[in-house]
Image (cartoon, rainbow, N blue to C red):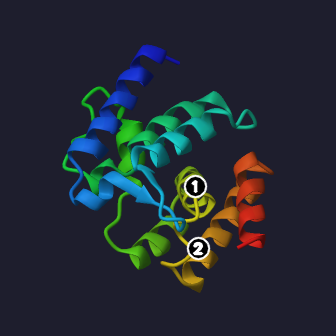
C-alpha cells in the first residue's frame, strides 16, 4: 500500500466534503444526540475498517478501501475523482453512487459480491453511528440484512458481518 498516496487521498476527501459539499448540511453528520462531526469521517471509517479485515485478500481490501474513501464524493460533493485512481476503483465508486434509494437496493443486490461487500461497509457505518434511526423504515433494515446474508455467503464471517448482525439485533 502506498501510504503517501493514501494520505493524499484522505486530504482530497476532507476537502471535498468540507469545501465542496453540494449542500452545507452535507459537510456535517449530525447524530441523534444533536452532536455532529465532519462528514468525511464516515468515508474514512469505511475505508479503514475494510483495510483491517484480514480475512479478505489484499486484492479486495486495497481497491475496496480506495472506493470506500471516495464512495460519497460523487453523490454529495462537486468534487471529481482523482485521475490517478485505477479504473477498477472508479468503477466501484460509480457502482456505489445512487440518487434514489429504491434503485440502489434493486441494483446493488443484483451486482457482484464485491459491490455488495462495499455497500455493507457503508450501510453498517450509518447504522453504527446512529443517524439512521429516525430516517428510515423497514425496507432499509431489510436491505442491510440482505447485504449481510449475501456477503457472509460469499466471504464468510467477516468482522463487518458480525458488527452488522449485532447492530441489527440491537436496533
Residue that mark 2 sits on: 143
Above or below, comparing residue 57 to residue 145 in the picture? above
Left or right position of 131 against 53: left
Left or right position of 152 against 62: right
Is residue 75 visible to the viewer in this orientation of the structure? no
Q: Earlier in the sequence, mark 2 or mark 1?
A: 1
Q: Where on the picture, by quarter, is residue 48?
A: top right
Q: In front: mark 2 or mark 1?
A: 1
Name the residue rendered at 57%, 49% in the picture.
Answer: 114
User: Which of the labelled discs sits on residue 112, or is there none?
Assistant: none
Asked if marks 2 and 1 touch (Cβ < 8 Å), the reply is no
Left or right position of 131 against 56: left
Q: Classify mark 2: helix, strand or loop.
A: helix
Q: Nearer the viewer, residue 25 or 84?
A: 25
Q: Classify mark 1: helix, strand or loop.
A: helix
Name the residue rendered at 59%, 34% in the picture.
Answer: 61
Q: Nearer the viewer, residue 56 or 8?
A: 8
User: Which of the labelled discs sits on residue 125, or is there none?
Assistant: 1
Amino acid at each position: 500500500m502506498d501510504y503517501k498516496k493514501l494520505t493524499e487521498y484522505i486530504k482530497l476527501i476532507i476537502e471535498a466534503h468540507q469545501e465542496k459539499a453540494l449542500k452545507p448540511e452535507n459537510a456535517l453528520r449530525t447524530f441523534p444526540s444533536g452532536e455532529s462531526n465532519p462528514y468525511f469521517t464516515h468515508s474514512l471509517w469505511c475505508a479503514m475498517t475494510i483495510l483491517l479485515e484480514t480475512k479478505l485478500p489484499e486484492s479486495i481490501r486495497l481497491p475496496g478501501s480506495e472506493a470506500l474513501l471516495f464512495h460519497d464524493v460523487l453523490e454529495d460533493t462537486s468534487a471529481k475523482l482523482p485521475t490517478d485512481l485505477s479504473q477498477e476503483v472508479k468503477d466501484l465508486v460509480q457502482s456505489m453512487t445512487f440518487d434514489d434509494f429504491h434503485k440502489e437496493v434493486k441494483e446493488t443486490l443484483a451486482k457482484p459480491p464485491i459491490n455488495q461487500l462495499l455497500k455493507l461497509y457503508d450501510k453498517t457505518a450509518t447504522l453504527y453511528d446512529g443517524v439512521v434511526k429516525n430516517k428510515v423504515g423497514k425496507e432499509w433494515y431489510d436491505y442491510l440484512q440482505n447485504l449481510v446474508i449475501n456477503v457472509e455467503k460469499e466471504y464468510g464471517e467477516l468482522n463487518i458481518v458480525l458488527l452488522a448482525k449485532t447492530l441489527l439485533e440491537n436496533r
